Image (cartoon, grey):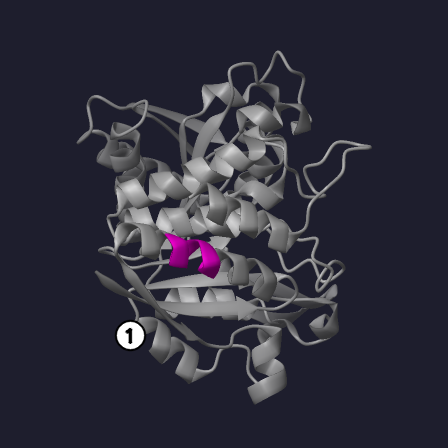
Amino acid sequence: MNYKIAIVPGDGIGPEVIRQTIRVLDKVGEKFGHKFEYTEVLAGGCAIDASGTCLPQETIDTCRASDAVLLGAVGGWKWDTLPGSERPEMALLGLRKELGLFANLRPALLFEDLAEACPLKAEIVEGGLDIVVVRELTGGIYFGEKGTKDTDMGLAAYDVEQYAEEEVRRIAEVAFDMAMKRNKKVTSVDKANVLESSRLWRRVVAEVGEKYPEVELNNLYIDNAAMQMVRNPKQFDVIVTSNIFGDILSDEASMITGSIGMLPSASLATGNFGMYEPVHGSAPDIAGKDMANPMATILSSAMMLRYTFGLSDEADAVESAVKKVLADGYRTSDIAKEGESAIGTVKTGDLIVEAI
């Protein structure tokens, strides 16, 4: 089979981790008889430098014409002084909106060989962690009405949190469908004691839940959910929540699993199309130093193989290779213990390709 992938290397360490991921995909293609065709496009700070905008129309068109999108990271200190609407990170919001990527899946998995990297007490995470955060991605406060106005206390700025029933319904269905393939438990996170938008969210999620009688549905307020994530994370299986709450909780979940450098994500549209990217940022402080951990991006490509291309065996091969490299004791600097020698980005790619 031939697959067209739009490659968005981005900024900072993005090009470095993408480069190793392409090597892994090429090895998968060689082993299983597939051909991956890559088209590289610009987004983020590098696009601002090249064209004056963080998301050129050519990038959107190329992504739409592809079977999937693989993204590195965007942003960096160089562009920190730009107005909010012109910052590199706006490219991510633009891609999500333009490509209809309404469902963000962030698995937070504590690898057995990295258990010591978890900041929580050993007894809390004994037996491992396996949580999936299903985050609504194209609605809520990030995409709501924004503006400024004069008040008696001076200039004020506002961002509107708004959700329509169908926006909530479709993300809830993604969460319940995923729960049916896992442990049949969904935790919906909102702030229904204060926010009208959260009261609608809770009502619609409950309506969807009635169609899945086998799935246990629990509701938590965001403040309690954040506390429970560090107090007793094993109570969670699938978490479904809004754009802003999901942004916060998924990062919290990623850190309790040891390193944000290990965690992939998928942003899905209706059907099989998706954009795949690591949870970590562009880390400009280590860019070009052969220090970045490419495993999160490589694991994101495994999600692409599984969710968009339907290649489960190929995805398993990538994930097994990452686990083997960890089991053999190799560590990048972000997951190495104090005094433990670390390998670089390229060497990590070498070892995963060899394991495949």
Left or right of 299? Residue 282 is right
Q: Nearer the viewer, residue 352 or 245?
A: 352
Query: Relative to residue 124, is residue 212 depicted above or below?
Result: below
Query: Relative to residue 308, is residue 200 depicted above or below?
Result: above
Q: Secondary structure at mark 1?
A: loop
Left or right of 329? Residue 284 is right
Q: Residues within 10 Å of mark 1 (few under 14, many from 20)?
A: few
Q: Please name the residue shown 53% across and 29% down the image.
A: 111
Q: Please name the residue shown 32% across and 22% down the image.
A: 183
Task: Tell me the quadrant of the picture where the N terminus can be found.
Answer: bottom left
Left or right of 132? Residue 225 is right
Query: Relative to residue 49, is residue 182 depicted above or below?
Result: above
Viewer can see residue 146: no
Q: Position of residue 65 (x, y in %)?
A: 28, 74
Q: Position of residue 150 (x, y in %)?
A: 66, 72
Q: Main secondary structure of the magenta part?
A: helix
Query: What's the residue type where badge 1 is placed?
Result: Ala
Q: Position of residue 235 (x, y in %)?
A: 47, 19
Q: Judge whether residue 23 is colored magenta.
A: yes
Q: Judge whether residue 300 is colored magenta.
A: no
Q: Please name the residue shown 76% across and 38% down the image.
A: 341
Magenta extent? 22-27
